[in-house]
Image: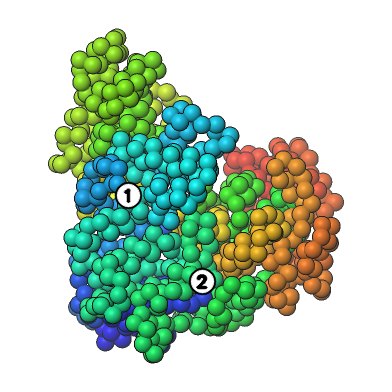
Amino acid sequence: MTQVSLLDALNPSQRQAVQHFCGPLLVVAGAGSGKTRALTHRIAHLVRQHQVDPAEILAVTFTNKAAREMKERIEQLFAEQEAHEQFGIPLAQLEPAQATRLKSRVYQRIIKPLWVGTFHSLFSQILRLDIEKYQDPKGRKWTRNFSIFDESDVQSLIKEIVTKQLNLDDRKFDPKSVRYAISNAKNQGWTPADLEHHQPNFRGRTIAQVYEVYQDQLAANNGLDFDDLIWIPVQLFRQNEQVLAYWHQRFRHILVDEYQDTNRTQYELIRLLTTNGEMQKSKLNWQNRSIFVVGDADQSIYKFRGADFTILMEFQEAFGDGLPDDDTRTMVKLEENYRSTATILQAANALIDNNTERIEKVLKPTRSQGDPIFCYQADDEMAEAEFVVNAIKRLENKDPDVSWGDFAILYRTNAQSRPFEEVLMRWGIPYIVVGGQRFYDRKEIKDVVAYLRAVVNPADSLSLLRIINVPRRGIGKSTIDKLTQAAATLNVPLWEILSDETSIHTLAGRSAKPVIQFVQLLEHWHQQLAQAKATEILEGLLRDSGYLEDLKAQATEEAEERARNVMELYNAARQFEEEQGDPSLEAFLSNVSLASDLDNLQEGSEKVSLMTLHSSKGLEFPVVFLVGMEQGLFPNFRALEDPAALEEERRLCYVGITRAREQLFFSYASERRLYGNREAAIPSLFLSELPKELIELDKPGAIPRPLSRGTTLPISATPKARPAARHSRSEQWSIGDRLEHPQFGRGHITHVFGSGERVTIAVKFPGIGQQKILDPRIAPIQKL
Ligand code: ATP
Ligand code: MG
């Protein structure tokens, strides 16, 4: 019975994948076919059916959020089963206290020991244990308490190297592009020497030089960048057989989701761990060992980060034994889509069929036809946002089961969120920009994290410099300059100068006292590292440094907001301790550094989600708006001239379409402000590739292929899709007008925004003592 319930909610192919025990298996299938579901169930199945120790399972997900979700689902699967076994009833029927106890037992026994996370989070944990065994070709050293440098740390370090240390012209060697080139090299597994070898010109040589100094600087700060978290384990595994053998023995079952977006170094890590570095396939021993990957080549969208979907296509060659029946033993195809209505799925299949670089596959709908797809032509980007928000309001209003969290607005570039944010804000609709201003990028959070990093890793000079005079403690810029110069001249970490009182008295003069106090503060908490929990240290630092007090003393709204954010970080630490069971500050800091922007997306938080198409991978929403469907925007300009880039954009569109479960909307503007200028826009090629019969148009006729500018389109909103007009268009509203609302009572207009069709009004209702912003076309108001 237990087995039945685990395999119950799966189709025969999914079941085959879930029941696979040893050896390699590739699951390839289109979007929404239950790949992630199969992967999750397989983990549960390995533990329950094959008594695999959860600690021997390594599962790689694409985001931290996906990792959390996966753990929750596995916990749920186990809890369901154990409720049946122990009490003979479904989990939902247990007493709440009983259910909680059962879940927490499952958590301790199964979920906690599992290794589920992104490549970066998993391999940073391995480095926390083994980095001291790594031998850098240039003798650089890192210790286990290394800091992880985020993108802005890295950018400023590279800028400093380019402009100050190597005195290069930063117009020729733009720090951003240099950074990109170095990152690229690391993703290819190249050392500076390799980079020079591959690009033996002046530029290549110079970038290799920056790369070399950059690594020196990282090591001097005991810091690693994101690429190092992958690239250093690869080198470590290659140079140290014992280390590799240990992890190879440890992780007998490796599972990877979204395998199509793996890059070469990530692949190399998986290969090394699975094969123990053995190159001859005939010598591989698959007893009690497996590699299980799931992916969809049509959803490969991270080429710009080195992702390469040929890795997916070569899976069987790389891991299979090449026997004649290999294909069926090492590959499972899933052919049914459970996510989307038939209409949405047909649109997705038709679109992707235009790509030449792909393997044909079947993806059949299991759901009914559903509503047609709606395509809206707006006058400009503001009108587009108004349309989308109106449609959201209307749908949310219509059905009590629908909530704000059911909607997603997907766009090609981050900057496109602004008009949507403005209109959502105007209506007071809760929303979240996934991947926008990240919590961990805020100044106050970076400050406090710098304190924590300096406590863990005093060699991290970048962090020390960030907080040495924050809050102000009377250490001026000239003193700081003297201290850093001394460190540079003596070629020692800044900390060595700071922690030497004599040097401080010499160099800092009148500021010596605050410097010494600052050092004592960090030293004190550094000594507590082994025994104190992350929350205790954080609390102590916030108090002793005067950071929070300083914010409070400022007594501005902004400072209050900052203080709230700092407390939110404290909450995050507390939550982390409870969830992870490792209360150390080092563990919490790793988690902070790796928290990806996608983690902003909270489940069940009932907010409209705004995000780029890239961020939407793997997610699903009942209603999806794909906006900005214009040539040059989506597909982007580069893709207009490069067929391979166009195919990547089309895959991105395929990803977007297949996020929708019930309803899909497209929109585009006929005029858009780009780089400050108003430009006439041409509808996206992708729209013309969709089957006409699936799209709701207001006049019959095709969407013309967007060949030239000035093409007019016969589509615009159908009257039915527009919010029902309660008031005639000619109704004029002006400040001072009096009106009545059935709920809010009588009121008068205080502001009028926009004009004509897009007018909204602010109304003061003295009866309820509030001001409301209303859309006169849909608000149930009566002019008095
Ligand atoms: P993507 O390619 O977008 O990552 P996926 O292949 O990983 O998609 P899932 O996210 O696992 O697909 O599943 C898509 C949806 O279909 C989910 O809501 C899932 O719960 C549901 N689903 C998957 N398999 C089944 C099934 N056998 N029966 C019913 N629903 C299913
Ligand atoms: Mg998935």
On the image, which quarter does residue 411 sit in? bottom right
> What residue is at 41 percent from the left and 74 percent from the top?
315
Q: Left or right: 619 with respect to 391?
A: left
* Residue 318 visible in the snapshot: yes
Q: Which secondary structure lies at badge 2?
A: helix
Badge 2: how crowded within 10 Å, few (<14), some, or many (20+)? many
Residue 55: x %, y % from top left: 21, 66
Give amino acid for label 1.
Answer: Asn
Q: Residues within 10 Å of mark 1 (few under 14, many from 20)?
A: some
Q: Is residue 706 above or below residue 546?
A: below
What amino acid is at disc 2? Ala
Task: Give the quarter of the figure containing the N terminus.
Answer: bottom left
Q: Which residue is mark 2?
A: 297
Residue at screen point 20% across, 15% down: 502
The correct choice, above or below, for 739 with respect to 359 in the image is: above
Q: Residue at x 16, y 34 (%)?
A: 527
Q: Position of residue 497 (x, y in %)?
A: 25, 22
Q: How many marks?
A: 2
Q: Secondary structure at mark 1?
A: helix
Task: State which quadrant residue 95 falls in.
Answer: bottom left
Q: Is residue 206 above or below residue 358?
A: above
Viewer-side label of 2, 1: 2
> Does the image show residue 582?
no
Tag on residue 591? 1
